[in-house]
């Protein structure tokens, strides 16, 4: 079992407990991280995860003396809405959840984001313990305190920074994760290395090259890699807790948006790298190295029917702009990103980059 500390939020930061079987330590970790007067806990999960891991999570919390209830926030990405948050808030109120009590988010990034958001606003903030069960949530979303929901205005437009009281990542839960969800997590892992830590990128690529990423083999190597990914995210968060618009260096949270301007999938990362190459900031060999790593992450959802201009229009309407200008996270090399204002990039370069990425995805 690995323990790490994230230096963000109040009370000197919070602990990440990571490894096989971490879920069974949930009650004990909660006892250490929550207020000593905490009595009630609401476990928020979804209809797929709760039947798999709910009993263990609730059992561990009850054994630690908590009064536990659960509430399901289903519907996946489409259910990550204010309406779901409101339903959770009604449930918290009906349970009489007080300021010193807590919420446990048991699931992937969707559950973590919506439960974290509801926790951030219930009584102006009750603690949340994040228990990520997807690879993406373990390497990325559970650490850092970004919570939120989608709305008509866009993805994650409504939200709050609410650092967790603790993060418990049980790597054995990844054994039941569908293949495409693993691919999404590996994308995020490759991205984190690509924008900020070349060694992490190489380790991730080598792990993917040497393993069947979904086979559950070499569990310790997997836990070690996830721990390194978490440590990277924790470093970035500690340096730039609230994603300052003025920061642009290696430890800026904004560089984690690499690939998000075009889409929230792998093709976005490739598009940003293709644009970087066309602008002359990224060597062709570096682009090739990224393409090879991404190919190891698994099969990408087909993008053949998408149109480059449509994608760029959608990107322009997204929220990643500052002072009215869309911001592009580009690569200078693997491990080093830079942020470039959209007005400084010729439209034909953007279009060619996105087209090349769509061709890559197929
Ligand atoms: N807060 C942040 O910093 C941050 C960062 C990145 C992404 N996100 C958000 O994360 C969300 C995506 O999260 P995700 O990729 O984890 O998707 P998800 O939460 O939708 O989970 C994917 C699917 O896997 C299922 N699942 C989860 N764990 C499982 C397990 N162990 N076994 C079997 N099935 C399991 C879920 O029920 C769901 O159907 C997006 O909404 C994104 O905006 C947030």
Image (spheres, rainbow, N blue to C red):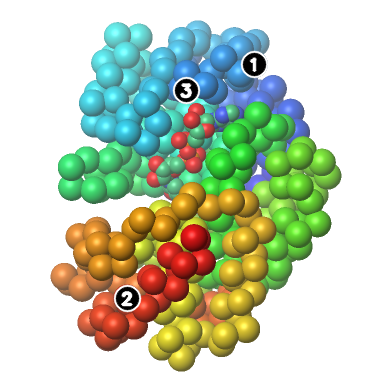
Q: Residue at x 53, y 52 (%)?
A: 300
The image quarter in which residue 304 lies: bottom left
- Image mark for residue 76: none
Instruction: Please tell me how crowded label 1 is: few (under 14), some (14-19), or many (20+) other residues with Cα within 10 Å.
Output: some
* Mark 3 crowd level (few <14, some 14–19, many ≥20, 10 Å Cα): many
Label located before the other in sequence (2 or 3): 3
Residue shown at 37%/26% (left/top)? 75
Q: Position of residue 154 (x, y in %)?
A: 23, 48
Kindly indicate the quadrant of the structure image that contains residue 294.
bottom right
Mark 2 close to ligand 1, CB under 8 Å: no
Q: In the rendered image of this protein, does residue 36 appear above or below residue 267? A: above
Q: Percent x, y for residue 255?
A: 44, 68
Q: Earlier in the sequence, mark 1 or mark 3?
A: 3
Task: Identify the disc placed on residue 45.
Answer: 3
Image height of 333 relative to 319, above or below: below
Residues at marks 1 and 2, CA–CA distance in whole angstroms: 49 Å
Q: Dividing the image into 4 quarters, which one contains the N terminus?
A: top right
Q: Position of residue 79 (x, y in %)?
A: 32, 29
Q: Which residue is label 1 attached to?
A: 56
Q: Earlier in the sequence, mark 1 or mark 2?
A: 1
Q: Is residue 130 left or right of residue 295?
A: left
**Marks 1 & 2, CB-CB < 8 Å contact:** no
Q: Secondary structure at mark 3?
A: strand
Is residue 343 in view from this perspective? Answer: yes
How many residues crowd around disc 2 within 10 Å: few (fewer than 14), some, or many (20 or more)?
Answer: some
What whole-number distance in Å separates the C-alpha atoms at marks 1 and 3? 13 Å
Q: Would residue 156 be found to the left or right of residue 188 on screen?
A: left
212 vs 51: above or below: below
Q: Are marks 1 and 3 in contact (CB under 8 Å)?
A: no
| Horizontal side of residue 32 vs 106, given as left or right | right
Q: Which mark is residue 351?
A: 2
């Amino acid at each position: 079992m690995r323990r790490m500390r994230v230096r963000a939020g109040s009370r000197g930061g919070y602990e990440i407990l990571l490894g096989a079987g971490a879920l069974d330590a949930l009650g004990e970790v909660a006892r250490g991280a929550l207020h000593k007067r905490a009595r009630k806990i609401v476990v928020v999960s979804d209809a797929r995860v709760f039947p798999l891991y709910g009993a263990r999570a609730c059992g561990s919390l009850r054994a630690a003396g908590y009064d536990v209830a659960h509430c399901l926030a289903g519907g996946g990405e489409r259910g990550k809405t204010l309406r779901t948050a409101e339903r959770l808030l009604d449930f918290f109120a009906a349970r009489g959840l007080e300021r010193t009590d807590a919420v446990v988010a048991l699931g992937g990034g969707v559950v973590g984001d919506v439960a974290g958001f509801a926790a951030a606003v219930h009584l102006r903030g009750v603690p949340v313990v994040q228990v990520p069960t997807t690879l993406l949530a373990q390497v990325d979303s559970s650490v850092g305190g970004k919570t939120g929901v989608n709305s008509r205005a866009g993805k994650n437009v409504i939200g709050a920074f609410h650092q967790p009281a603790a993060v418990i990542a049980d790597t054995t839960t990844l054994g039941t994760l569908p293949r495409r969800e693993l691919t999404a997590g590996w994308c995020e892992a490759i991205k984190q290395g690509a924008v900020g830590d070349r060694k992490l990128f190489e380790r991730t690529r080598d792990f993917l090259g040497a393993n069947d990423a979904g086979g559950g083999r070499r569990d310790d190597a997997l836990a070690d890699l996830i721990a390194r990914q978490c440590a990277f995210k924790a470093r970035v968060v500690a340096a730039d807790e609230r994603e300052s618009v003025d920061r642009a260096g290696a430890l800026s949270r904004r560089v984690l948006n690499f690939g998000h301007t075009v889409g929230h999938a792998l093709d976005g990362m490739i598009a940003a790298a293709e644009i970087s190459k066309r602008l002359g900031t990224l060597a062709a060999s570096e682009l090739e190295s990224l393409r090879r790593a991404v190919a190891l992450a698994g099969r990408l959802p087909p993008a053949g029917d998408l149109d480059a201009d449509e994608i760029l229009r959608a990107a322009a309407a997204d929220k990643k702009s500052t002072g009215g200008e869309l911001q592009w996270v580009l690569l200078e090399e693997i491990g080093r990103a830079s942020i470039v204002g959209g007005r400084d990039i010729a439209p034909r370069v953007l279009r060619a980059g996105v087209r090349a990425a769509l061709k890559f995805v197929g």
